[in-house]
Image (tube, helix red, strand yellow):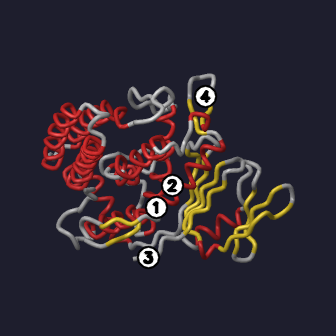
Amino acid sequence: MRKLLNTLFVTSEDIYLSLENENVAAWKEGKILRRMPLLNLENILYFGYRGASPALLGACVRRNIGFCFLDQNGRFLARTGGIIRGNILLHKEQYRTSEDEAKSCAVAAPMIAAKIYNARAVLMRGARDHPLSVDTELFKAYAADLLDAAREAARTTSLDELRGIEGNAAQMYFSLFGQLILTDQKHFSFAGRSRRPPLDRVNALLSFAYTLLAHDCASALEAVGLDSYAGFLHRDRPGRASLALDLMEELRSIYADRFALTLINNRIIQAGDFRQMEDGAVWLNDKGRRTFLSHWQERKRETITHPFLKEKILWGLIPYVQALLLARYLRGDLDGYPPFLWK
């Protein structure tokens, strides 16, 4: 198990990053504001436009430090990754699996089954903890339907059928998600998912969390020697890290959705932490983004018992562990891919 290293978040758009000896140097108006040793870093997430020096990007590649560029609204722009540490046999097996629908479905089915199971667990936890705030009977009825859907997903051998099951389950889950918002429902109302762009504060939080989670999953896959762009459920598309999107499916509700609910229900994020654009898009502002990122890092340092390994690990290592298990399955060390099932 590797140590959970730090992620450097650069949220000021007028900061320029460069390499100074073995340190990241943050420049502003011709002066160095801060230095951070590369040895202590696992990822750098840069929100802005000034950029970074080629020397720093090269150093990050050599040291397997992920570097992700996002705009001020948190939308993905580009990313670099470290040198892939896998071997040619693992790569070939991943590509062979990706090209074979039956083999792809054998990997994707447990991922989507786990996604549905975990979404159901989030709803059941909410109904148990706040029985007076939600429609308990409706939650129970949908929980039964979602359990059936998870079992059906685990059995299917067709990717198209799997996508249909996942879509129906997601619709059920998000139809109840708004009831889990317990405070300031005037400003944090939720009528359903809106993605590109997010059209309300709740969707802005979810989209930002999914962006960060996708980056973490891509970095984890590359760290264990897999190609984050060759997916199984998500098919090939230029510029899309399809396998990272596959891997994050089972983690969306328990990793990102619950985090967004915590920020809202504990009043950590306020209505004033957002800005609305003329086209209707809603994004976190600078203050809201800093608050989000600070608590995101704290969340990653919490511990949980991994359901398959039966060991306590940091939340921030879950993507890495799941990537490692996926690599072991593709190498033939495991009979099946063990998804993350939250309890």
- Mark-to-mark CA distance, 1 and 3: 14 Å
Q: CA distance from mark 4 to mark 1?
A: 29 Å
User: Given this view, does label 2 or label 3 mark the residue nearer the observer?
Assistant: 2
Q: Please give the label number shown on residue 2.
A: 3
Q: Amino acid at mark 3?
A: Arg
Q: Which residue in the structure is indicated by mark 4?
A: 276
**Label placed on residue 296:** 2
Asked if the residue under mark 2 is in contact with the one under mark 1, i.e. CB atoms within 8 Å, the reply is: yes
**Residue lying farthest to the front in this orientation:** 132
Q: Earlier in the sequence, mark 4 or mark 1?
A: 4
CA gap between label 1 and label 2 equals: 6 Å
Name the residue at 37% across, 32% down: 178
- Name the residue located 14 percent from the left edge and 39 percent from the top edge: 144
Task: Give the amino acid type for the residue marked by disc 1 in the picture.
Answer: Lys
Q: CA distance from mark 4 to mark 3?
A: 41 Å
The answer to the question of whether label 4 and label 2 lie on touching residues, with beta carbons closer than 8 A, is no
Q: Which residue is mark 1?
A: 300
In the visual, does 259 lie left or right of 70? Answer: left
Dot placed on the residue nearer the N-terminal end, 2 or 3: 3
